[in-house]
């Protein structure tokens, strides 16, 4: 197990993946991390759609105009959903779960990248939500926050450089 201090320094976004499939036990471990993540009022109201079908992942990559095409090379995509009418903290709760999955993937030696979907879409006005809902048969009351693309790393990224940390953005007691 990696020390969290090191894990935080090592976790970087990866957009290039090998063709190697992900061990089903690793998928379960990643989902376990999401399901254990804290939520507002312990609602645990998020939902996750695990997508391993290559055709569906390719369609999901086309749900918005920019920043998602790399998903076509991912062997696994996990859509993070919430019901905005039922949970006013669905964005926060989903974000915590998504980041938990990313740190768990890193600890397992896998790469991941957050693909923002909320508030995104296509030039013709179609929202990413509409596209994703059609691909994954998501009920109308749920919205997609993001999709986490996961796979075996096809590239190497240097750890975060501590010299670049913006400590000047940290304020004690008052801004």
Image (cartoon, helix red, strand yellow):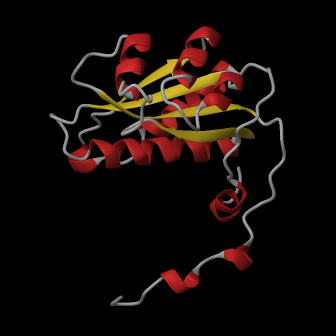
Query: In x, y percent, where is residue 71?
Result: 63, 28
- The quarter of the picture where the C terminus appears is bottom left
Q: Residue at x 28, y 41 (%)?
A: 90
Query: In x, y percent, where is residue 79?
Result: 46, 28
Q: Residue at x 68, y 60 (%)?
A: 3
Asked if residue 157 lies left or right of residue 58, the reply is right
Query: In x, y percent, where is residue 84?
Result: 21, 36
Location of residue 155 (image quadrant)? top right
Location of residue 59 (image quadrant)? top right
Asked if residue 23 lies left or right of residue 41, the reply is right
Asked if residue 94 lies left or right of residue 61, the reply is left
Asked if residue 68 lies left or right of residue 97, the reply is right
Determine whether 55 is above or below 162 in the image: above
Location of residue 140 (image quadrant)? top left
Determine whether 38 is above or below 115 in the image: below
Query: In x, y percent, where is residue 47?
Result: 36, 27
Q: Residue at x 42, y 41 (%)?
A: 36
Determine whether 144 is above or below 24 in the image: below
């Amino acid at each position: 197990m990696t020390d969290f201090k090191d894990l935080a320094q090592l976790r970087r976004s990866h957009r290039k993946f090998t063709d190697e499939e992900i061990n089903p036990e690793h998928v379960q471990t990643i989902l376990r991390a999401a399901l254990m993540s804290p939520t507002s009022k312990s609602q645990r109201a998020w939902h996750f759609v695990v997508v391993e079908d290559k055709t569906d992942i390719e369609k999901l990559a086309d749900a918005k105009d920019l920043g998602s095409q790399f998903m076509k090379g991912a062997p696994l995509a996990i859509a993070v959903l919430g019901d905005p009418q039922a949970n006013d903290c669905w964005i926060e709760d989903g974000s915590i779960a998504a980041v938990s999955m990313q740190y768990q993937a890193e600890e397992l030696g896998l790469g991941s990248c957050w693909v923002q979907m909320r508030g995104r879409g296509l030039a013709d006005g179609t929202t990413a939500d509409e596209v994703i809902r059609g691909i994954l048969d998501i009920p109308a009351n749920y919205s997609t926050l993001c999709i986490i693309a996961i796979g075996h790393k096809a590239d190497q990224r240097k750890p975060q450089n501590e010299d670049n940390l913006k400590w000047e953005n940290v304020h004690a007691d008052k801004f």
